[in-house]
Structure formats: structure tokens, C-alpha cells
Amino acid sequence: MNFIHEVEKLLNASSDAGIDWMAIRRSSLGYYFQEMKNISQNPEFHGEGDVYIHTRMVCDELIRIPAFWKLSEMQKIGLFAAGVFHDVGKIRTTKSEDGKLVSPNHSSTGSRMTREYLWQACGLCGNKESIQLRELICTLVRYHMLPVHMIDRDQPELKIRTIAAIGELVPEFSWDLLCILSEADMRGRIAGDMDEQLEKIELCKVIAEEAGCLDGPYHFNDSFTKHAYLSGRNVQPDQTLYDDTWGEVLMMSGLPGTGKDTWIGRMIPDYPMISLDDIRKEMHVNPTENQGIVIQEAQERAKIYLRQHQPFVWNATNIMKDTRQKQIGLFERYGARVRVVYLETDWNTQKERNCSREAEVPMQAVEKMLGKTVLPTTEEAHKVEWICV
């Protein structure tokens, strides 16, 4: 059954009589349940027991929140799925430190695990609706703990506006939605600090509303000012800065086999291209080997174009944010405007295209890359696009 219809059916069956957990265990949502049962939690914050029990309690609380049933159908599906997957990262990250169970970075780990599962097993890839639903779920999983910590952060308005900007690519996402999940997360556990945590969530909603982005992205005057602000420059969000960039560097992003070369040849054939695949061939470096010398050579070629104020394409997978930011930082230091184009296709087409490549990447390596993939988001560059091919 289609994932969207499957979750929709489960929700419709749950609205009056509670959640049918037997049906959910048999559905796509039940994939991680057995592993969740094997993961204990710190009883100081989770007196209810293991991750599976907590997950059930969170989802039970979620459907009791009146605001949940007022959401759009896609928001309800995404939010409920996020409730199911919100702590899957604890499966890989839970460990004992000084006699206490901790799960460092479980939200970011869980977001990647959720993306990989929804992509491969549930077919949420390769078309606009699937990408937006998948990334709605993954974004909620990634940031589900943030509302209770926002009041303690430096520059909370900046962080809130940065995350809200994801709504430009995922229209159903908002801080309001994130706070509903966070409230259910706090209510779905046994701990002595619930009232304190719920108060922090309410304060987060107040900050988001005052920052102009509780229900959607903050409206900036232009993309240049938006990027300057979201990058952390000393800029007021309502300013209109002078755009002193000289031209565009286009960064491609996407797994092997998504058709990056084809898209470049069709859309921007006149742009010079720095292709890591081509450099690997020239230097006889296998894609599975250390890429240090390939990256170094590519950067030296990029600097020549940058000094000449020559627009060009940086063509590589660029599936991780840290990798993208290193190159974007270089381009921007030379005064370029950066546009990131992320390409995605359905899983079967991607495997076929990869197999037909002259330099085929082993599928085991592609699957490993998928597990590390984090889609580019609005704050990373002057312009970010997600395109299905």
C-alpha cells in the first residue's frame, strides 16, 4: 500500500477509539519497533521504560492534542509518522556514561535513519510530494528536542528563523508543528520535570511568533539579505543589503545516478564545469579511495575561475552539509553568489542509471552514501532548489 494512504488509514481508524497498535506494528511504521523494545532509557527522564513504550505514549498523547486534528491531511500524516520515528536514533546512539544511559545526537542520527528507511523501503523519493513528506518527517525528527532548549540558546530568533526557512522547501513544515510534536514528547513520558518542559515549549512558541515565523518562514526583503542573516552575519532581518556578488557558482548535489551530468548539459551547457568524476579519471583515483587529492585539485581549478569572476558548475555528490559548506565558503570568499541544485530520482531508476555509468559506483557504496545524505536547506546558500528528474 502507498505510504501516505497507509498512514492516513491508520489515523482515521485511531481518531475515535485510540490507536490500533497491532495494525501499526504490521504497517510500514512498525519497522523499528522490535529494536526499540531492546533500548532502555534513563529512568530519571523516562520512568516509563524502553524506547518502544515511550514511542507509544508519545503517539497516544499526540492524537489527544486538539491542534493535531486541525492540521492539513499531509501535516497530520507527517507529524504522526515523526512521532513514531522521533527516537529511532536511540537504537544506534544509546550508551552508558558514568553509570547513566545517554543518547547523544540521537535526533540527527534518527533523522538520517528515517530518511534512508522511507526512501528505500517506503518509496518516498523521486517526486515532489514524496520528497516533501519525507523531509517533513525527517525535519521534525531532527529538531523534535529543540523547542524545550530554545530559551537557553544564544540568539534564539536567529535559530528559529533559520529552521523556519526550511518551510520554503517543505511547505507543510512550521514551528507550530514542531512544538506540537515536542509537547507530545514531553507528555509521553514519566518524569518530574514535565510542567517545566511544557512551559519552555510555550515560551518557544512566543519567541517564534514574535520572530514572525511560528506558522511559516520569515519573509525577508531579498535572497541576498536572507542568506547574509541566516549565515550569522551582523545583519538585521528587515534590512535590504547591497548585493555585491559578481556572478553565480552552481553547486550540484545528489547521489550517483541521479542525472547530474544530463541536467547540466540540458540546462546550463555553456557553464564551465569542475567535475570530481572527471578529475578522478584523470588522476586514476577510484571513487571508494581517499578523495583528498581529487578535492585539492578541484579547488585549485575553482580558484582560477573565481579569480576571473567566471561562473562555473561544481559537479559532485555533495550529500553532506559539512562537505557543501567547505566549498560554499570558498566560493563566497571570492565574492560569488552560490546556487545549490539538488537532484533526486526514484530508487529503481537511480540504480539503473548508476549501473549504466561508465564509472559505476558499487551499490553498496551508494547505499552507504544514502545513509549519510542530508538534503541542502535554505540557509546554506543564496538559492537552494530540489528538483525531481
Image: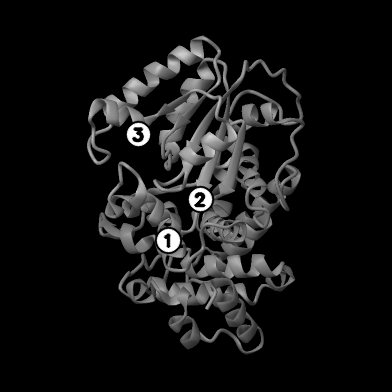
> In percent of the image, x 28 and y 31: which residue is there?
281
- In the picture, the disc for residue 198 is none
Taking depth in this image into account, of 156 and 30 the one nearest to the observer is: 30
Q: Position of residue 155 (x, y in %)?
A: 60, 35
Of the two numbered discs 3 and 2 on the same chain, state the one appearing first in sequence. Answer: 3
- Element class at badge 3: helix
Q: CA distance from mark 1 to mark 3?
A: 22 Å
Residue at image mark 3: 277
- Is residue 109 visible in the rendered image? The answer is no
> In percent of the image, x 47 and y 66: which residue is there?
85
Residue at image mark 2: 344
- Element class at badge 2: strand
Residue at image mark 1: 348
Q: Are marks 1 and 3 in contact (CB under 8 Å)?
A: no
For badge 2, the amino acid type reads: Glu
Question: 125 above or below 184?
Answer: above
Q: Position of residue 217 (x, y in %)?
A: 70, 45
Label 1 CA crowd tier, 10 Å (few <14, some 14–19, many 20+): few
Q: CA distance from mark 1 to mark 2?
A: 12 Å
- Element class at badge 1: helix
Q: Position of residue 270 (x, y in %)?
A: 56, 25
- Is residue 313 visible in the rendered image? The answer is yes
